[in-house]
Image: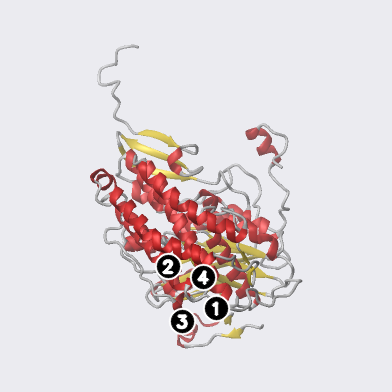
């Protein structure tokens, strides 16, 4: 090594480019973030996405409406049930049918179970990213209970394909209600356990309070929805704003945060799990009798037209914009993915943060790359 | 089910402002759709933004290759204050640039990049119009109807992945 020339130094203070991902464990998949660093501080960041792009929208144009149904499970693969709900409801709207009351209640119960399971995966992995090993073991214990219910109901645990256009394929299994009641009785205490591990934990608070702030105005400007928006203090939830599948019948609250930081997102998601449990407890006591599938034609050709329908998925507003030309396949099938839109806010959130905080911030948005890239 | 005309104070105000550039306003499955002349799309979007549509839900496109103006651009808007949605649609010929919505909704950035990536539609005034999901040196725009589902950029695949075919 040669001695530095006068005025130069080996301890160069210029900016450095750090490539994070796409195979970085904390990016929850194949997200690549190119960070421009000044020492430990992030000056700028750019997301490079598309590593998991499978052309879901193109595939949609080449499958019948029924055939495409299992594909939506593979977008946000930790909340397959919610994706199925959004897709089935959008197609039903296009066709002009409504799922029977019994099917709607079952859909709500399964979708809320799925919300809990999605938030649980988020909680465990997010805590793991920040360095807390324990929560993941606790949270996956509860997730297993939910996945067992899914498995008993439809035979699959993750890519459930739980719903059919017009309602449900299967009726409830014997003991479904008691399984759900048992879950609702035990689960709130389990959330308390997570809270004892994290909520007042000094390390957890040091790593999350004030980190990755995003105010309500910026959220709205960027189209950010879901828990990230609610953590910024906006009590907006599609289940309340534009109820679907009978959500108007259930009493629940929209948890909101105050500071819009990583800690508030954690608090909001924890409260949402409790609220989902509340919804399930109400639904399980009022499952109506009756058919589970609306009358829909065997040859399914929705009339010419277009609809946009969206639901409150665990990550935010999940929308389907479908154009029908009256044939067996959608002419155009657009998925409005919450993860993709929310990820756009990352750049503003990480500017000025420390490198270690980038990991916490990515985790706090709760993205699934299967849905970002589609 | 045919669509019904959508006429109320809101559409009347828009017609006062933009006259015949609001080509049609309809209700289908209880959803509101504004069909706008492409020449005044930027102004209509600005007016809607001022009218309280503070959330741009989505920007997307549909390709109708046999039409004289083969591209439909769709903007889905939502107003938090009024809890209402509206869709704006405009038709574009091949090669026409679309006014970017990023000045009103910064969130349009990635959505428009995706439209560019998938359809090859360019947006004027976009701060950073590059492909977003596909590699930057990929040829073709997959969501166009003249792009068959099995088609891919063979040269790219061979060069970068070292395999004969991606399928």
How many badges with numbers are in the image? Answer: 4
Q: Nearer the viewer, mark 1 or mark 2?
A: 1
Instruction: Please rate how many residues cluster around mark 2, counting C-alpha atoms within 10 Å: few if below 14, some from 14 to 19, many from 20.
Output: many
Q: Position of residue B145 (x, y in %)?
A: 70, 59
User: What distance separates the C-alpha of mark 1 from that of mark 2?
Assistant: 37 Å
Position of residue B11 relative to residue A93, above or below, is: below
What residue is shown with label 4? Answer: B41
What residue is shown with label 2? Answer: B55
Residue at (24%, 45%) from the top-left corner?
Answer: A206
The numbered dot on residue A44 is none
User: What distance separates the C-alpha of mark 3 from that of mark 1?
Assistant: 51 Å
Instruction: Please rate how many residues cluster around mark 1, counting C-alpha atoms within 10 Å: few if below 14, some from 14 to 19, many from 20.
Output: some
Relative horizontal placement of residue B160, taking residue A124 as reference (left or right): right
Quarter of the rendering containing residue B102: bottom left
Q: Is residue B64 visible?
A: no
Position of residue B28 relative to residue B61, above or below, is: below
Instruction: Please rate how many residues cluster around mark 3, counting C-alpha atoms within 10 Å: few if below 14, some from 14 to 19, many from 20.
Output: some
What residue is shown with label 3? Answer: B17
State which chain disc 1 sits on: A
Going from N to C along the chain, the mark reached first, 4 or 3, is 3
Secondary structure type for disc 3: helix
């Amino acid at each position: 090594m040669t001695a530095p020339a006068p005025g130069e130094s080996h301890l160069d203070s210029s900016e450095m480019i750090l490539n994070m991902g796409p195979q970085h464990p904390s990016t929850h998949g194949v997200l690549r973030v190119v960070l421009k660093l000044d020492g430990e501080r992030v000056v700028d960041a750019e997301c490079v996405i598309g590593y998991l792009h499978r052309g879901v929208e193109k595939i949609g144009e080449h499958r019948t409406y029924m055939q495409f149904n299992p594909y939506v499970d593979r977008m946000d693969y930790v909340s397959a049930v919610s994706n199925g709900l959004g897709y089935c409801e959008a197609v039903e709207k296009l066709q002009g049918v409504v799922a029977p009351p019994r099917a709607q209640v079952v859909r709500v119960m399964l979708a809320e179970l799925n919300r809990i399971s999605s938030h649980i995966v988020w909680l465990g992995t997010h805590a793991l990213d920040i360095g807390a090993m324990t929560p993941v073991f606790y949270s996956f214990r509860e997730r297993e209970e939910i996945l067992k219910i899914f498995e008993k109901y439809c035979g699959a645990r993750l890519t459930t394909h739980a719903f059919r256009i017009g309602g449900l394929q299967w009726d409830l299994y014997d003991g479904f209600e008691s399984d759900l009641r048992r879950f609702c009785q035990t689960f709130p205490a389990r959330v308390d356990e997570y809270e004892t591990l994290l909520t007042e934990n000094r390390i957890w608070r040091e790593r999350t309070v004030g980190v990755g702030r995003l105010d309500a105005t910026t959220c709205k400007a960027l189209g950010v929805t879901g828990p990230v928006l609610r953590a910024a203090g906006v009590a907006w939830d599609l289940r309340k704003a534009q109820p679907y599948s009978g959500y108007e019948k259930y009493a629940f609250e929209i948890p909101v945060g105050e500071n819009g930081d990583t800690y508030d997102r954690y608090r909001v998601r924890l409260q949402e799990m409790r609220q989902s449990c509340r919804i399930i407890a109400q639904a399980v006591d009022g499952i109506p009798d009756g058919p589970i599938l609306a009358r829909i034609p065997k040859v399914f050709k929705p009339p010419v037209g277009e609809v946009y329908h969206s639901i409150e998925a665990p990550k935010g507003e999940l929308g389907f914009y479908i154009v029908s030309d009256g044939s067996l396949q959608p002419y155009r099938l657009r998925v409005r993915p919450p993860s993709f839109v929310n990820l756009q806010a990352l750049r503003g959130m990480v500017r000025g943060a420390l490198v270690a905080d980038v990991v916490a911030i990515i985790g706090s948005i709760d993205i699934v790359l299967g849905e970002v890239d589609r | 089910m045919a669509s019904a005309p959508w006429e109320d104070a809101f559409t009347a105000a828009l017609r006062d402002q933009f006259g015949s550039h609001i080509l049609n306003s309809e209700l289908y499955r209880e959803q509101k759709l504004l069909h706008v002349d492409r020449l005044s799309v930027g102004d209509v979007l600005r007016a809607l933004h001022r009218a309280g549509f503070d959330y741009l839900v989505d920007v997307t496109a549909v390709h109708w290759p046999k039409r004289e103006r083969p591209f439909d651009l769709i903007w889905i808007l939502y107003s938090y204050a009024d809890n209402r949605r509206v869709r704006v649609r405009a038709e574009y010929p091949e090669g026409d640039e679309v006014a970017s919505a990023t000045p009103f909704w910064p969130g349009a950035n990635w959505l428009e990049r995706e439209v560019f990536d998938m359809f090859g539609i360019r947006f004027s005034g976009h701060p950073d119009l590059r492909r977003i999901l596909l590699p930057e040196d990929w040829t073709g725009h997959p969501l166009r109807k003249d792009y068959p589902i099995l088609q891919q950029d063979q040269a790219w695949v061979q060069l970068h992945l070292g395999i004969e075919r991606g399928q």
